[in-house]
Structures are given as structure tokens and as C-alpha cells.
Amino acid sequence: MSTPESIVRARLELPAGPLARPLAHRFVMALGVQTALPVDRVQEAAMAAETIVHLYTTHTSARAVELTVRAEPDRLHLRFSGLGPDGAIRLLAADASGSPPDVLRTLSSALDVSSGSSGDQALVLVVAAA
């Protein structure tokens, strides 16, 4: 286990397909154990990652998404990049109209969309202790 002041960062490319969801889940769980977060919050981060993977495979044209996880002592930062122009906005719209609605907002402590110089969007989700 990491020391309390350490930060662990890892990146994984998730191709669209049936293995993307379990890969995202396991990747987040493996990095989540490096934090002091309660197990239920790490599990919620992994569930959020699975939700994003499901949404990007059904609501964007992305063939693969890059997931970068930064594990800090008291939080997990999940960054999904490569969603394409307006990809993150489409994901959030699909999540808001889903059943149940707003899963990502419910599971996360913070949620943000960023755009690169090429117009490519990224979705950043933070899970911290409740």
C-alpha cells in the first residue's frame, strides 16, 4: 500500500466491446486500494467507470477511450478522454435521461467536462470520501 502522501497515476485504453466494462471496473478497483477511501466509495468509482464505458459505447462514435486514474490519499480522479467533439456532453445527456437518471452525478463528488485544442472532449469524475 502507498504512503498517505503518495499519488498513483495510471492510464488504460479501453476499446469499445464486451470487455471494456469489466476492465474499467478492475482497473479502478486496483488503483482505489491505494487510497484511504472506504471500500464503498472505491466501488462507487468503479461503478461510475462502468457506466461511462457503457454510455460511450452506445452514445458516441469513439472506438476506444483512454481512462486515466489518479489515486490520491483521499480521492480518485477518473479522466475519460478521446470521446470526440461533444462526446462528454452526449454522455452526460444520456446519463441524465437514463433509468435511473443521473447515475454519474449520484456516484461522484465532482464531475467536469474539458475540451482539448482539437475539440476533443474529456469527462473528469472525482470520487472523494462522503
Image (cartoon, rainbow, N blue to C red):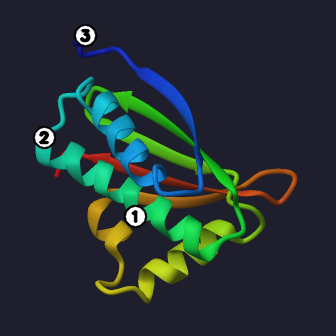
Point 30% across, 15% down: residue: 5
Q: Which amino acid does label 1 sit on?
A: Thr
Secondary structure beneath dot 1 equals helix
Which residue is the site of mark 2?
A: 39
Q: Distance between the residues labelled 2 and 1?
A: 18 Å
The first of marks 1 and 3 along the sequence is: 3
Vertical position of residue 126 compared to residue 37: above or below = below
Q: Is mark 2 on a helix, strand or loop?
A: helix
Which label is found at residue 117? Answer: none
Whole-percent x and y of residue 108?
Answer: 32, 59
Residue 118: x and y in percent read 87, 54
Disc 1 from disc 3: Cα separation: 30 Å
Q: Which comes sooner in the sequence, label 3 or label 2?
A: 3
Residue annotated with mark 3: 3
Q: Earlier in the sequence, mark 2 or mark 1?
A: 2
Residue at screen point 61% across, 67% down:
88
Q: Is residue 33 left or right of residue 112?
A: left
